[in-house]
Amino acid sequence: MNEVIETGHLSIGNKVRRAIWIVTSFFLFKPFVGNVFSGWRRLVLRLFGAHLAKGANVYPSVKIWAPWNLVMGEGSCLGPDVICYNQAVVRLAANATVSQYSYLCTAGHRTDRRNTADGGLIVAPITIGHDAWVGTKAFIGMGVEVGQGAIVGATASVYKDVAPWTIVGGNPARVLKKRVMEDR
């Protein structure tokens, strides 16, 4: 589990960067559909501070909160309509896939206060390991590490780390079985 950091409120500078990103993504990111424009989308994300390998794939319908907190390895993919609420870093290792309609959430609020909406913002990064796969409509909570080769089943809700080469599912997610690879 990644370390949780209390941030309080978002800075004005962060809010301004977000506003510029929202406008830019509307005009220069989202309209460019199809694989032929994947290089263009990577370029736009890089201009906002994302660290993307050449073969990373980000679908135009992905909602990215802060490109400067996105790191993607070679062959990694954020699928259609993924919500990447990355107030902290979201890292996808090589060949990691996050399927359609999944939600990556790096932020929350302290629960030991009467008014949780009044400050108390906490964040922790999310890491999706090499060759890992997050199934459709899955939720990955803040601070979670999905290990190498692990599979998160469709609609699973993950609040704790997923060990390498395991398959998890359910809400909350639990281990269903170990992933065994065939020799071919």
Image (tube, rainbow, N blue to C red):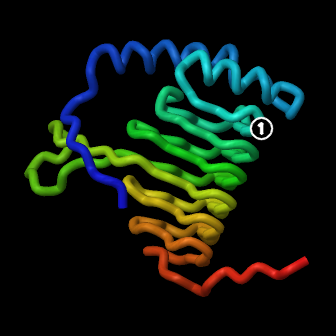
Residue 56, x across and y down, in percent: 72, 39
Question: Residue 22: image x %, image y %?
Answer: 53, 20
Image point (31%, 44%), residue name: 123
Furthest residue toward front: 183
Which element is circle 1 on?
Answer: loop
In this rendering, the answer to whether 129 lies above or below 164 is above
Relative depth, front residue between 5 and 137: 5
Q: Residues within 10 Å of mark 1 (few under 14, many from 20)?
A: some
Q: Answer left or right for 11 relative to 42.
A: left
Image position of 119 (left or right of 33): left
Residue at point 19% right, 35% down? 8
The residue wearing badge 1 is 55
The residue lying toward the viewer, choosing from 25 and 162, is: 162
Q: Position of residue 67 (x, y in %)?
A: 53, 28
* Quarter that holds the C terminus: bottom right
Q: Is residue 114 above or below residue 65?
A: below
Which residue is at 27% across, 50% downward? 4
* Amino acid residing under circle 1: Gly
48 versus 133 height, above or below: above
**Residue 184 relative to residue 25: left or right:** right
